[in-house]
Amino acid sequence: MKGSVIKYERDNIDTDVILPGPYLKIHDYNELAKHAMEGLDINFHSKVKEGDFIVAGRNFGCGSSREHAPIALAYSGIKAVLALSFARIFYRNAVDGAFLLPIEIDENAYKEISEGDVLEIETSKNEIKNLTKDTIYKMKPFPELIGKIIAAGGLFNYKP
Amino acid sequence: MPKTLFEKIWESHLVAEEKDGRSLLYVDRHLVHEVTSPQAFDGLRINLRKVRRPDLTFATMDHNVPTSDRSLPIVDQISAKQIQVLERNCKEFGIMLFDIHSPNQGIVHVIGPELGITLPGNTIVCGDSHTSTHGAFGALAFGIGTSDVEHVLATQCIWMDMPKTFEIKVDGKRKNPHAITAKDIILSIIREIGTAGGVGTVMEYRGEAITDLTMEQRMTICNMSIEAGARAGLIAPDEKTFQYLKGRRYIPKNYDELVDFWRENLKTDVGAHFEKSFTLNVNSIAPQVSWGTNPAMTTDVTGTVPFPEEYAKGNPDEEKAAIKALQYMDLKPGTPMTDITLDRVFIGSCTNSRLEDLTEASRVIKGKKVSPKVRAMIVPGSQLVKRQAEEIGLDKIFKEANFEWRESGCSMCLGMNPDILARGERCASTSNRNFEGRQGAGGRTHLVSPIMAAAAAIEGHFVDVRELDVI
């Protein structure tokens, strides 16, 4: 999986900024996508491209249980969020519907990766290649259940 | 081996467990609302599935309902549609619905306990992060997303990795329980352990200062467990719990027998091991006011808006976050919290909209008027709370003081209905999240207790409620 980085150097990016409350009434996923990250970055919709990754700090996706948050990101084209850590409901929501990969990275990777860097993620090796900076980072392996839901392609395909 | 309360409930609900820890848990109660359920019901229809246990599933509409006159049609057509969709889904799948005109309608986490749907030792899920509220009854209660809502509708089970245990010991005795509330206790805890302090854990609140609390106050504590990132909050049930639920509408027929079982079993054994522990002493805590854009950015009402470097204690990321938060909040470091003036006051939400919250607020409102610069509203958590408040005349006290007295719902907590802040407006709010834009794009939220919010409405700025005569 290859894509370029949109970076937010910020902890606690909550689901209210990822998808503000008023849009929770929208059922069309492509419509939701138009409002992704609107609470934090009004230009997100115009700059995001299919296959991009978000890089962010600690506790990404904290707050509400709205699955609309990973859905809005996924339908904007985001394939993975790389963060220092994730809030648990967002983490689970991201993989349940196979919307995007929530990947935990370390401080070094977080500091080194810049906006616009092209990354290649190989989850089978728990590796992230920074093609722009010619470096390789380790990603934290997925917990058992999350890894198996991802491998199955979502919660409803998952068989223990 | 001695066990924690969490471990006992977890083990008694295990349907299957893999060697690597993956667990399939049975769900005793599933609460449903209009915002996180439509796609779940669509999924059932597409796959020709039924709801496995409609008798254990209860629905209401709370997030987007207007809090104005309910005899009038809903103006917002998209909200109206979402409400109709829930009505249609509940009818089609045979689920009990407390609709907008039901005498039992209300915020899902207010009506669960007051209808006796929430029971000790239960597992409870809902497509809402504040499901942790029900932990106040010794129930293991998780917020889940829409895919899991669909999974529970279809199977009455949920897949989870086992969370870790986190003891939150709350010692001491509050000098003035009217001024130092459950809200101040939980904000003090989050302020210390941080917004991610509880991630991956179930926090069990224990100690003298917790057993001292009423059931409604315990709900306020457990409600905000998610603001520390916890999967759930938990308080062992006791006589107060059993008394609160007795006679409520949906409790089982063999309630008294169940109480005997709960009394014996639903507690953490002496010597049980918690993976993490934190202690707060309430003897010296002050009323809390948030100054930033997450619930950990909170200080004493007697304090000042912090300097970012002082708040960050050497952590550059925290310092940056504080600078951004102060910009958003339009606050200058060093400003006394009591100098902060307000445009709006909101008393409501699943954190603080129950009868005791409103009664406490009325102590400082009675005979006074809302500051002319402030627009203030009170949104009871449920129709039952509203009726009970009106029976004891609270509505008159509020209306005479120029508070708006509204219909029940989530309202201005999350800005999904017409109750929102305008850009730049500053609000004292009894809700749970002060995130950017949460109460309306560009709105600024200060989290406080109901009595602090009420006093702020009267004075037009924050005041230390300990100094008021009526307290």
Image (cartoon, coloured by chain):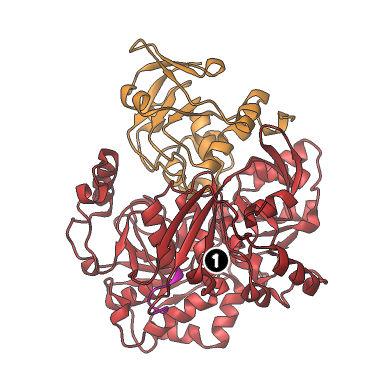
**Is residue B232 visible in this depiction of the protein?**
yes
Q: Colour of chain A?
A: orange
What count of labels does the image hold? 1
- A9 sits to left or right of B276: left
The location of residue A68, given as percent across then percent down, is 54, 41
- A47 sits to left or right of A101: left
Residue at disc 1, secondary structure: helix
Q: Colour of chain B?
A: red
* B263 over B57 or under it: above or below: below
Query: Residue at image x 74%, y 71%?
Result: B259
The location of residue A127, given as percent across then percent down, is 48, 17
Q: What is the quadrant of the C terminus of chain A in the image?
A: top right
The part of the image, by quadrant, that contains residue B188 is: bottom left
* B229 over B188 or under it: above or below: above
* A141 over A61 or under it: above or below: above
**Is residue B85 visible in this depiction of the protein?**
no
The part of the image, by quadrant, that contains residue B321 is: top left
Q: Give, as a three-letter code, the residue at label 1.
A: Met
User: Which region is colored magenta?
Assistant: B176-182
The residue under label 1 is: B219
The part of the image, by quadrant, that contains residue A38 is: top left
The foreground one among B422 and A132 is: A132
**Residue B152 drawn in magenta:** no
Query: Residue at image x 47%, y 53%?
Result: B277
Label 1 marks which chain's residue?
Answer: B
The location of residue B129, given as percent across then percent down, is 55, 52
The location of residue A95, given as percent across then percent down, is 59, 32
- B341 sits to left or right of A83: left
Query: Residue at image x 79%, y 48%?
Result: B51
* A155 over B35 or under it: above or below: above
